[in-house]
């Protein structure tokens, strides 16, 4: 389907890593899970963090935002460094930085120290996440092993957010919010110990790093995520939001112009010539918006409306990651060789649409079972989608560009989540304010506050439903690949219908 698999820099299969396939897969997936978990693990701990470190309410959001800002802003740079300087080397550097920042964050004594540590965690994650997927793509080439590896990796990526809520609830209730950060240190140390023993190093591409491109895209992506965050906090028409988003657009336009003229571009635009890969990026962008908004609103819904504890909230989310893992590992990876990718990338968005509609029907009197059923629908949808999306994103890419291809998939997830929170947060805010005005003095009561939240949430999920429809449209209009044939020494080449 593409000519990239025949690129002169194509690498041989990794016999050493293949012999240690189980351990190699465990190292990569544990690292991915650790990075994804930290996007949500502190969410349920925010009240405790605010109390212990005397955070102001305005600055508290930066405990979450600092991580996503650095992570989303540095992903393309992180993915490219693995292609240029060796994936295992950069993977280990990313994990080392992530673990060290977690240790510092766990010992934080004030706002600035914790926020800086969270930003450093995001930077480490931005290096580790795309190199992890690139290592997976070039390590596992035998069909069954490749399918199993992608299934487990996708399950980690899709369910990590919900598992983060559970882990954050357990650690906050039974230990301290600090252990939500400390726990990364021994895990990171174990990954660093095993990585050189079970993962082979790739041959770096001996081209120069595109520093102008790296600087403009990092600044542009960071500014974009910051501007979207300010839009959710303030409004889309605030001066800060408008100026920040304007600067972000200017920086990203400059990045495109730099890449078009660069001899060694940070992001080769030929990656987007494959309509299936472009479709995968768009689908991930849209699905992530719905997934992030689910974690954000429903964790508050159960605690603010139903009075659940952080631990109970985390446990209540368990059906979703369990369903995602079951679908990804047991069902999807086994059926893809038989029926192909397209049926799953059609069914996934349809199930996500049904889940968003179901979430929008929850109110203050809803029992757990409608919530449970909605989580199952979303888990089924994401479980159908993440394995084929992951496989399509790196399918047919030259080995020396798998880092940037996988980074773009991660970028779609992070940017999609940030845009989703900004847009749906604004919808929620406006709907909640209108409902509070209707209730008048009654909005201050406990029942009134629950009613205001539920109405805002209903409108937010209606907006998320529209975005899930866009994911379905992208799938039906762009995805033409059905089966992917694993290579004999290079990444897979797609076989279109």
Image (cartoon, grey):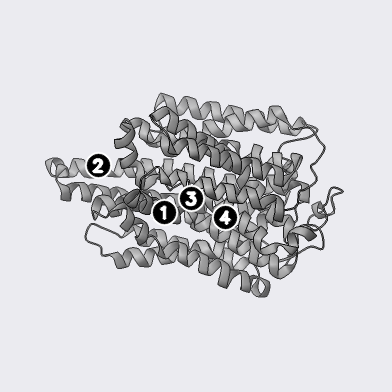
State yes or no: discs 3 and 1 in contact (Cβ < 8 Å). yes
Q: Which badge, 4 or 2, is on the more N-terminal residue?
A: 4
* Mark 1 residue element: helix
311 and 410: which is toward the camera:
311
Number of numbered discs on residues: 4
Which residue, given by chain and number where applicable, does mark 3 sit on? 37
The tag earlier along the polypeptide, 4 or 3, is 4
Looking at the image, can residue 71 be seen?
A: no
Q: Nearer the viewer, mark 3 or mark 1?
A: 1
Residue at the spot of label 4: 30
**For the residue carrying disc 4, how many other residues have a C-alpha within 10 Å: few (<14), some (14-19), or many (20+)?**
some
Q: Where residue 286 appears, x then y in whole percent?
A: 52, 51
Look at the numbered discs 4 and 3 and tell me whether their residues touch, using CB distance below 8 Å. Answer: no
Percent x, y for residue 21? 69, 63
Please, is residue 78 above or below residue 451 in the view? above
Secondary element type, mark 2: helix
Please tell me how crowded label 2 is: few (under 14), some (14-19), or many (20+) other residues with Cα within 10 Å: some
Rendered view: 257 above or below 453? above
The nearer-to-camera label among 4 and 2 is: 4
The Cα atoms of the two marked residues, 1 and 4, are separated by 15 Å
Earlier residue among tags 3 and 1: 3
Is 427 positioned to the left or the right of 201 in the image? Answer: left
Pointer 2 or 1: first along the chain: 1
Residue at 70 percent of width and 27 percent of height = 212
Residue bearing mark 1: 167
Cα separation between marks 4 and 2: 45 Å
Query: Left or right: 476 with respect to 114?
Result: right
Q: Quadrant of the C terminus?
A: bottom right
First along the sequence among labels 1 and 4: 4
Residue 434's mark? Answer: 2
Separation of marks 2 and 3 at Cα, in angstroms:
35 Å
């Amino acid at each position: 389907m593409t000519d990239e698999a025949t690129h002169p820099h194509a690498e041989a299969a990794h016999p050493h890593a293949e012999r240690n396939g189980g351990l190699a897969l465990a190292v990569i997936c544990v690292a991915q899970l650790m990075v994804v978990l930290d996007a949500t693990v502190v969410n349920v701990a925010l009240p405790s963090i605010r109390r212990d470190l005397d955070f102001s309410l305005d600055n508290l959001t930066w405990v979450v935002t600092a991580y996503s800002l650095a992570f989303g802003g540095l992903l393309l740079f992180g993915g490219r460094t693995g292609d240029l300087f060796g994936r295992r080397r950069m993977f280990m550097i990313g994990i080392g930085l992530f673990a060290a920042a977690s240790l510092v964050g766990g010992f934080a004594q004030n706002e600035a120290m914790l926020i800086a540590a969270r930003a450093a965690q995001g930077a480490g994650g931005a290096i580790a996440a795309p190199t992890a997927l690139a290592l997976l793509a070039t390590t596992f080439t035998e069909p069954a092993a490749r399918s199993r590896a992608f299934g487990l990796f996708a399950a980690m990526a899709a369910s990590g957010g919900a598992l983060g809520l559970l882990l954050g609830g357990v650690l906050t209730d039974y230990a301290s919010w600090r252990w939500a950060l400390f726990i990364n240190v021994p895990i990171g140390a174990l990954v660093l110990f095993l990585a050189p023993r079970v993962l082979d190093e790739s041959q770096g591409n001996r081209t120069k790093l595109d520093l102008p491109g790296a600087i403009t895209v990092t600044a542009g992506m960071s500014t974009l995520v910051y501007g979207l965050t300010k839009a959710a906090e303030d409004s889309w028409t605030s001066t800060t939001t408008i100026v920040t988003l304007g600067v972000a657009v200017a920086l990203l336009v400059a990045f495109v112009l730099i890449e078009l003229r660069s001899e060694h571009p940070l992001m080769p635009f030929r990656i987007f010539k494959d309509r299936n890969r472009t479709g995968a990026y768009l689908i991930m962008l849209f699905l992530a918006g719905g997934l992030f908004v689910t974690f954000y609103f429903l964790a508050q819904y159960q605690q603010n409306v139903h009075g659940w504890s952080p631990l109970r909230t985390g446990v209540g989310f368990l059906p979703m990651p369990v369903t995602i893992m079951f679908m990804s590992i047991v069902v999807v990876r086994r059926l893809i060789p038989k029926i192909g990718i397209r049926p799953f990338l059609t069914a996934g968005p349809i199930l996500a649409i049904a889940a968003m509609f179901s979430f929008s029907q929850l109110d203050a009197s809803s029992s757990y079972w409608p919530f449970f059923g909605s989580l199952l629908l979303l888990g089924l949808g994401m479980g159908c989608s993440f394995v084929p999306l992951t496989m399509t994103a790196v399918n047919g890419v030259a080995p020396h560009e798998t880092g940037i291809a996988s980074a773009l998939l991660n970028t779609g997830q992070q940017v999609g989540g940030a845009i989703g929170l900004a847009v749906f947060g604004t919808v929620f805010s406006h709907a909640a304010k209108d409902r509070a005005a209707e209730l008048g003095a009654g909005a201050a009561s406990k029942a009134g506050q629950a009613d205001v939240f539920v109405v805002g949430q209903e409108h937010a999920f209606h907006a998320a439903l529209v975005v899930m429809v866009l994911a379905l449209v992208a799938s039906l209009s762009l995805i033409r690949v059905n089966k992917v044939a694993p290579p004999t020494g290079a990444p897979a080449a797609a076989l279109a219908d």
